[in-house]
Structure formats: C-alpha cells, structure tokens
C-alpha cells in the first residue's frame, strides 16, 4: 500500500483526527454512496451508532457533531469554521437537516445518534455503523466504517462489516523508492547519494509534479501557520465542562515584552507557546493539519516555527524538506505500527509526532540519514508506554501541554543526534516495533476510553 506524505498531513476540523476527521470523512463517503446508488431521493432518515472508543469518548471529542457536518456535505478544507456552530445549532433546534446539502430529512439528535462503548469491533475499536432508511422506516443502506487514526477511514465490507475492505486503488501505485522500514530509506540514501527528503520527493512525483508538490507542502504549512496565528489571537475558555483557559496569547505577550525575553531558554518557551496556540485552536474545533493526528497536531508546526524563527539559514525549501522528512517517518509508523491513541495509546500520537518533528529538524539542520534516524528514534524512545487518558474525553488535558513538552523534546532529540555521528544502539525500526508491542500490551482503559489514568483522577465539576 503506497502512502503519500499528504495522507499523513491532512487538513480538517479539530479536535481529533480519529474521533472527528475520520467520522466526518466517513459521513461524506456514506452520503456520496447514497447518491451514487440513486438512494438519496428515497432517504428519509439517517442514524449512526458509535462503538468502542468512539462510543466512550465521542461526546467529548465532538464525534457526533463531526459526523453531522459530514452528512451536511461540509468540506473541512474550505469550511468557514466560525459558521459551523450555527449550522449544528440549526440541525438541533429544527430536528431536520439538508443531507449532502440537497435532501431535507428529519434528524433528531438524541434519537438518531447512539453511543455504544460496550460494543467493540474485532478489526478496530473506532467503529461506527451508518444506516439510511426510507419514509416507511425500512433500512435501505448500511455501512460500517473504521476510523483507524490520523483521519484514515477503512470501510467494513458489505458482506461482513467485521471484515475490512481494501480499496482497489491501493497497491496499484509503484513507487521508485519502495520502503517499509527506515533501513530501506538509509540504504537508498547510501546507494543513490540522495538525502531523505529527496527520496521522499521522488516518490511523491508518482502523484504530483514538483510544482504541485511544492504548492501542496506550502499549503500544508500555510494552514498550520494560520491555525497558530489564530490561536495566538484568541483568549478565554475552551469548550467543555472545565472551561480550560487558553494560555497561548498570554505566553506570547510575556515572551515579547516581559522579563522572559532576556532568558536564554526563552526559545524553549517560544516552542511551547507555538504548540499551545495550535493545540488550543484544535481543541476549539478550528481548522488543523493532522501531524500525524489532530490531538498531536501542535508538535510539528511548533518545531517548524522554531526552525523558521531561530535556526540560522532557515528557508521555505527547508520547511518543505522538513515536512517531507517528517511525513516519511509518519508513514513508517502508520505502516508498521499505529498512529491511533485508541489502538496504542498516546505514544502513537504525541510520541510519533515528536519522532516526526525530531527527524524533520535534524534533516534541515544538516543531518545525514543516520542522524535523522537517530533523532526520530530518540523522539519515540522516551514516549514508549505513554497512555491516552484525556480528561472528560476532551483533547485538552493533558493533550495541549503534552504537545508543548514534546515539541521541546523534538528539539533536544535533533540536537542530540546532530551532536553525535549517527551511530546508536537501538534502530528506529526496533523502536517502532517496540511501540506496537507496548501498545498491544497496554490495558484498554489507557487507550482513549477515558476510563483510566488522569481521566479518572479529576472529578468533573
Ligand atoms: S492523550 Fe494523547 S492520544 Fe489521547 S487524545 Fe490526548 S493527544 Fe490524543
């Protein structure tokens, strides 16, 4: 299966790639299937059941609102995010919706959306069943979807929803540099004298011209930066029971004018502030780029902004190379382990983000293939075993602060690798395998169910 770096970096609406972007994409696929099969006109009702982790933390992660937006035909790349709360309020108040923007159907929020955490599908815990019915209430179409992390969606087959369907397009693409492990990338680099981002770019040319690759990478960075800037402009409380106060704007003010500006470690405070700005916007349902997920979306942009602001010689080409390298590392995790907190805990989200950002930074600071590997390995190694335990099921505590800490760890990891020769004892491939095994052994209550860890230590007020 050939994965592009643009499958790792996807634009969508926060706060969670698996619990928001995936279900929103699933809803879009569902309504397009209704149209394609000529069933949209007959459809008089749609209902959805969120199972497993989607059922457990779906309310806090806004899974229901994301799915409804997908049914309405909202496109995450272009949607006016300020208008979305009004759209959702109208559906709730009127008890009806314009399916795919075309067909008016009744839709009663509490009747047509069901959360069933006790039902856990065999293939993946993030499962949902979408069902369309006609005016007599007869079922006319049903599909199972699995949201497998990073906004990726896999459909259950029509014959047996427990069996995942592999899209026919997967596997048809032949990449010039087929790689499954970091050792493959290192071997190509040595054989052909190419840098890691050059190898990744050569693969991307299967789908796009160089101009299109550059435009797409610049577009990804633009959304990341706009999201960060927006996070710095907004203050007040985030949505949710705890009314968590945004901190990014105050952090920026303090750094620009307060005593912090003379502090030699202020650069780390800046990296934290960049991550907070993105994390807070994500938590508020803003437009965000998965890197590799939305919950962990603050790390890569924070480290790119650190590079852009504080590393001498930083350039737009450097940002593109950063994204290509970080994307390749994300592909390794996606291919060989998981980037889903519901599957392997937060090591698969913030841990992977730290590894991606460390590799990206090492690459643009002149690291060779071994040093890039070393940086990525350090980035994940110290996140192994990290659990996913969002308080109240919301991507706020501990997620936002965790992104900030991981951003600083990425910088440290890159610097540690660049300070050495690239020789190290544990390979990235071994660390990825270890992450997968650790995730497999992790108790379910620590995998995005909000039934363990910090999530049960804090009493909801
Ligand atoms: S704890 Fe980590 S994996 Fe879990 S929701 Fe937060 S960022 Fe995502």
Image (spheres, rainbow, N blue to C red):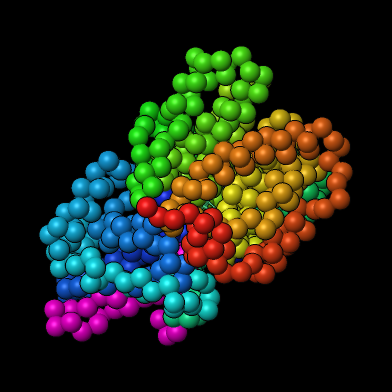
**In the drawing, does residue 263 fall left or right of residue 53?**
right
Please name the residue shown 72% across and 49% down the image: 382
Please name the residue shown 80% across and 53% down the image: 427
Q: Is the magenta stretch mostly helix, strand or loop?
A: strand
Measured as percent of width and height from the top left, residue 313 is found at 65, 21
Measured as percent of width and height from the top left, residue 22 is found at 43, 60
Measured as percent of width and height from the top left, residue 312 is found at 66, 20
Q: Which of 451 and 227 is in front in this view?
A: 451
Q: Is residue 322 above or below residue 16?
A: above
**In the drawing, does residue 236 fall left or right of residue 207?**
left
Q: Quadrant of the N terminus?
A: bottom right
Measured as percent of width and height from the top left, residue 179 is found at 70, 57
Q: In this view, does 446 lie above or below 352?
A: below
Q: Which region shows up in magenta?
A: 131-160
**In the drawing, does residue 185 fall left or right of residue 168?**
right
Check residue 277 for magenta coloring.
no
Check residue 139 for magenta coloring.
yes
Q: Nearer the viewer, residue 119 or 127?
A: 119
Q: Is residue 76 above or below residue 34?
A: above
Q: Would you say residue 293 is visible in this rendering?
A: yes
Q: Would you say residue 290 is visible in this rendering?
A: no
Please name the residue shown 35% across and 34% down the image: 236
Q: Is residue 160 above or below residue 393?
A: below
Please name the residue shown 32% across and 61% down the image: 64
Q: In which quarter of the image is residue 35?
A: bottom left
Q: Quadrant of residue 307?
A: top right
């Amino acid at each position: 299966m050939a994965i592009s770096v643009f499958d790792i970096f996807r634009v969508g609406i926060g706060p969670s790639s698996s619990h928001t972007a995936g279900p929103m994409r699933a809803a879009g696929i569902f309504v397009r299937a209704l149209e394609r099969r000529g069933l949209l006109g007959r459809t008089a009702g749609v209902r959805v059941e969120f199972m497993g982790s989607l059922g457990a933390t779906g309310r806090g992660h806004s899974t229901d609102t994301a799915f409804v937006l997908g049914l309405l035909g909202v496109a995450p790349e272009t949607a006016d995010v300020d208008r979305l709360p009004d759209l959702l309020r109208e559906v709730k108040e009127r008890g009806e919706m314009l399916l795919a923007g075309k067909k008016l159907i009744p839709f009663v929020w509490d009747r047509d959306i069901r959360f069933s955490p006790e039902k856990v599908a065999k293939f993946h815990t993030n499962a949902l069943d979408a069902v369309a019915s006609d005016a007599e209430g007869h079922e006319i179409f049903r599909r199972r979807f699995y949201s497998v992390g990073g906004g990726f969606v896999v459909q259950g087959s029509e014959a047996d929803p427990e069996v995942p369907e592999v899209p026919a397009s997967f596997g048809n693409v032949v990449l010039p540099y087929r790689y499954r492990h970091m050792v493959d990338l290192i071997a190509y680099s040595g054989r052909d004298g190419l840098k890691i981002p050059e190898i990744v770019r050569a693969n991307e040319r299967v789908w796009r011209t160089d101009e299109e690759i550059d435009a797409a990478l610049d577009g990804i960075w633009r959304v990341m930066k706009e999201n960060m800037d927006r996070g710095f402009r907004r203050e007040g409380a985030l949505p949710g029971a705890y009314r968590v106060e945004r901190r990014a704007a105050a952090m920026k003010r303090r750094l620009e004018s307060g005593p912090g500006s003379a502090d030699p470690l202020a650069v780390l405070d800046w990296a934290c502030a960049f991550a907070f700005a993105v994390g807070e916007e994500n938590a508020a349902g803003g437009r965000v780029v998965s890197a590799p997920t939305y919950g962990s979306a603050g790390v890569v942009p924070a480290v790119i902004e650190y590079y852009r602001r504080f590393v001498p010689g930083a350039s737009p080409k450097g940002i593109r190379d950063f994204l290509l390298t970080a994307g390749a590392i994300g592909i390794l995790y996606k291919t060989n382990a998981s980037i889903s907190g519901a599957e392997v805990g937060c090591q698969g989200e913030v841990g992977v983000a730290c590894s991606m950002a460390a590799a990206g930074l090492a690459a643009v600071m002149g690291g060779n293939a071994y040093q890039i590997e070393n940086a990525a390995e350090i980035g994940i190694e110290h996140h192994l075993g990290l659990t996913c335990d969002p308080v109240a099921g919301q991507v706020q505590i501990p997620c936002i602060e965790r992104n900030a800490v991981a951003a600083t760890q990425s910088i440290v990891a890159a610097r540690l690798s660049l300070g050495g020769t690239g020789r190290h004892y544990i390979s990235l491939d071994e660390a990825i395998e270890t992450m997968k095994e650790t995730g497999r052994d992790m108790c379910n209550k620590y995998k995005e169910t909000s039934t363990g860890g910090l999530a049960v230590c804090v009493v909801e007020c």
